[in-house]
Each structure stands twice: as structure tokens, then as C-alpha cells.
Amino acid sequence: MKFFDSVKTVLIKKPFDLNGRASRSEYWNFWLFSQVSILLFLYFSLRVKFLLIFVILIWVYLIIPGISVTVRRLHDVNKSANWLLGFVPFTLSAYVALFVFSITQDSQTSEIDLFGILLITTYIVGIMTTSIWYCFPIFMFLTQKGNGEKNKYGDPVT
């Protein structure tokens, strides 16, 4: 599946669909799109504070489709969505902490705060590292090739 086809499928065609299966390319293309979108708006919000509202809105808009494509990806490797129960609260709290940290910084300045960028980048890398460490089994499920046969979640993804 091509990059923008994957994003369109997750955001428009199946944003609330927890049934069926999702291919690796569909999942990882959407993941890349969502992370780059949020990071770009975070970067620009360091310069123009009111853009932080858009970061929060984008994050809220992407969270439900992100969970649904993750559930469908787990279905592709014949795993239940129950594997996410420990992962989702951890990730939500980490991102909420990131947004709170961004809001509480100094008022808007005309210069880009390099220390702020370094701090946010370090925090994001910390979130990603900790998420991967504590959620290694889920990470392995999301990266492995899906079952080529029909399973209880549906037909194989082409």
C-alpha cells in the first residue's frame, strides 16, 4: 500500500474500525505520518505559541484512528486487542505530560529556544525508548509479517 493510500485508509475509510486486519505498510505509514505531523507542529509552536492548540487538536484527531489501526495490525498477526491495555494508558500519559510541559514554557518569543527544542526532543526520544522497552512484545507483533492465511479476524491483507 502506498504512503498516502495508507494514511487515507486509516483517517478516512476506517478511523473507527476495530474489525479486520491491517498490513505492516498501512500501520507504519500512518505512524510515520502522525509522528511527523505532530513534531512539525510542535517545532513551530516553539516559535508561535498559539500553534500548540493545533498540536493538541491534531493529536486528539489522530489518537482514535491510531488505536484502531494498531488493533487491526495486531489482528493481522493473530493477536487480540487486549495486548494494548497496558500500552495505551502509558502512551497517553506520556503525550499529555509533553503537552503540559510545552504549555508551561515561557511566553512567546521571537527567537527559537534551542534549549527548549533539545529538551522536547530528549523527552520525545525518552518516550519512544521507554515505550519500546516496556512494550517490546507489542513492538515485535507490529513489525512481524502477518499471517498469510485466514484467521479469526478475517482474510489476509493484500
Image (tube, rainbow, N blue to C red):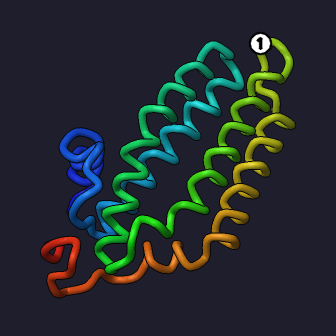
**Residue tagged 1:** 108
Please, what is the three-letter code of the amino acid marked with disc 1? Answer: Gln
Q: Residues within 10 Å of mark 1 (few under 14, many from 20)?
A: few
Q: Which quadrant does the C terminus fall into? A: bottom left
Q: Nearer the viewer, residue 40 or 137?
A: 137
Q: How many marks?
A: 1
Q: Residue at x 63, y 13 (%)?
A: 50
Q: Quadrant of the N terminus?
A: bottom left
Task: Classify residue 16 as left or right of residue 81.
Answer: left
- In this picture, residue 62 sits left or right of residue 106: left
Asked if 49 appears above or below 10 in the picture, the reply is above
The residue under the point 62% across, 22% down is 52
Q: Position of residue 44 (x, y in %)?
A: 62, 26
Q: Position of residue 141 (x, y in %)?
A: 45, 78
Does 1 sit left or right of 79 as displayed?
A: left
Determine whether 104 is above or below 93 in the image.
above
Closest to the observer: 9 or 87?
Answer: 87
Q: Quadrant of residue 25?
A: bottom left
In the rendered image, the vertical position of residue 116 relative to residue 82, given as above or below: above
Is 85 located above or below residue 152 in the figure?
above
Q: Position of residue 157 (x, y in %)?
A: 17, 72
**What element does badge 1 sit on?**
loop
Which image quadrant is residue 93 in? top right
Q: Residue at x 22, y 39 (%)?
A: 12
**Picture coordinates of residue 27, whole percent (x, y):** 36, 61
